[in-house]
Amino acid sequence: MVGRYHMTNEVTNSKASQKWPSHRCLRTMKTSYTSVLTIVAFSMERYLAICHPLHSYTMSNLERAWKIIAFLWLLSLVSAVPFAVFTSVNYVNYPPDSDNPVLESAFCAMLDENIPVNWPIYEMSSFIFFIVPMLVILVFYVLMGLKIRSRTNQALGKRFSSTNSDSNRTWDSRTKAILRMLG
């Protein structure tokens, strides 16, 4: 009974969990995926606000936000379906290597024996919902940092050529606010 547990390795004696383990797995995976995708969406919104403020301003509205949220939940639901399909109630055999399952040991999991051969479901999930979002967020933040740096360099050039200290203080407060938002 070799297996890798992925978000569903909770030991349970609940009749509902034993009857419908796939629902709990679907709910768990869908929520996890939506969390990751929401962080990517927030990072994209920050990127647009900092690097393309006018474009961001014209695109911002409540209807667009609802569409993005609905799309993220739908994508997460579709992506979590394979986990729900291959999750089942499993039991620990006692003594080991016997066919005597201990009923109190019921747990919901996706064991290797439940997954089709040569279908890298864990690897695909990790790549699509961890590696790719991490790289996308990294690119967004690097681009934001470069944009802030170029604005800072431009402002420093103006600061040395300008004698108006009020505009410098205003710019400094805006820079600090942006840096606080990124942190």
Image (cartoon, rainbow, N blue to C red):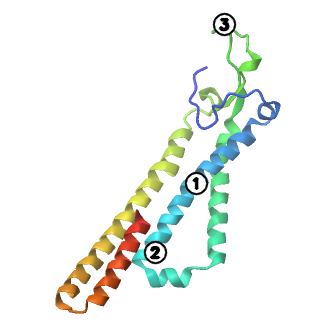
Residue linked to disc 2: 48
Q: Answer with left or right where residue 106 lies relative to residue 180.
A: right
Tell me where residue 26 appears, x and y as whole percent: 69, 44
Q: CA distance from mark 1 to mark 2?
A: 20 Å
Circle 3 sits in a helix, a strand or a loop, which is it?
A: loop
Amino acid identity at mark 1:
Ser
Is residue 148 placed above or below 108 in the rendered structure? below
How many residues crowd around disc 3 within 10 Å: few (fewer than 14), some, or many (20 or more)? few
Residue linked to disc 3: 95
Q: Nearer the viewer, residue 178 or 63?
A: 178
Circle 1 sits in a helix, a strand or a loop, which is it?
A: helix
Which residue is at 46% across, 74% downward? Answer: 48
Q: Nearer the viewer, residue 11 or 163?
A: 163
Position of the C terminus by quadrant:
bottom left
Amino acid identity at mark 3:
Pro
Quarter where residue 167 is shown: bottom left
Instruction: Give the label on residue 35, or none.
Output: 1
Labels 3 and 2: the sequence-earlier one: 2
